[in-house]
Amino acid sequence: MQRPASFVFLLLAAALPAPGAEPAVQSAPVLTLATYNIYQKTEATRAKEMERIGELLAKDRPVVVLGDFNSLPGGAAMTLLTGRGFKDSFAEANPAEKQATTWHWKQQGSEVKFRFDYIFPSRDIRTLESRIVPSDASDHDLVVSRLGWAG
């Protein structure tokens, strides 16, 4: 496939508000970009939703799935994605950063922190660099990755 210097992105809002709801997916010329946000659901529900999203994503072009998964590393959605060849962009670029967090919440004088936010490029894309940028604008920090074509 000939890859142009610039891309047309399809942005898939894949926050499924109710069981059985399906996002509409249109084709994109080169790259599919899928955003994902699940709030207060079980790992089983996250896995089911990610399985359905995986069925809808383009198989014939590079894909980047990213967003707030509200799930720890190794959770159901991440396991499904890595099983399909997607890579955790931040982990790939920063293998020594095992304790990195993207979500923080102050409660009763202490702060709770977890990693809930991810960028997962497909195997056609490699991570050139990735970092977490602290933000006071939200309870989530930003995950920023620079990606390039693999190979």
Image (cartoon, rainbow, N blue to C red):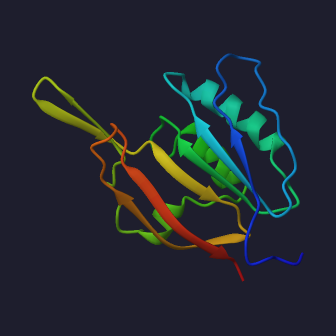
- Residue 18 lies, with reference to residue 139, above or below; the image says above
Q: Where does residue 12 sit, x and y in percent of width and height? A: 71, 42
Who's the residue at 66% across and 49% down the image?
81
- Residue 121 lies, with reference to residue 150, above or below; the image says above
Depth check: give the residue in front, 105 or 11. 11
- Residue 92 lies, with reference to residue 45, above or below; the image says below
Depth check: give the residue in front, 78 or 145. 145
Depth check: give the residue in front, 112 or 148. 148
Q: Where does residue 105 sit, x and y in percent of width and height? A: 26, 33
Q: Where does residue 74 sit, x and y in percent of width and height? A: 51, 45
Q: Quadrant of the C terminus?
A: bottom right
Who's the residue at 82% across and 33% down the image?
24
Residue furthest to the left in view is 109
Q: Where does residue 142 sit, x and y in percent of width and height? A: 41, 52
Q: Quadrant of the N terminus?
A: bottom right
Who's the residue at 63% across and 24% down the image?
45
Task: Tell me if 37 is positioned left or right of 61 in this view.
Answer: left
Task: Tell me if 122 is positioned left or right of 131 in this view.
Answer: right
Who's the residue at 28% across and 40% down the image?
113
Task: Tell me if 140 is positioned left or right of 88 in this view.
Answer: left
- Residue 104 lies, with reference to residue 64, above or below; the image says above
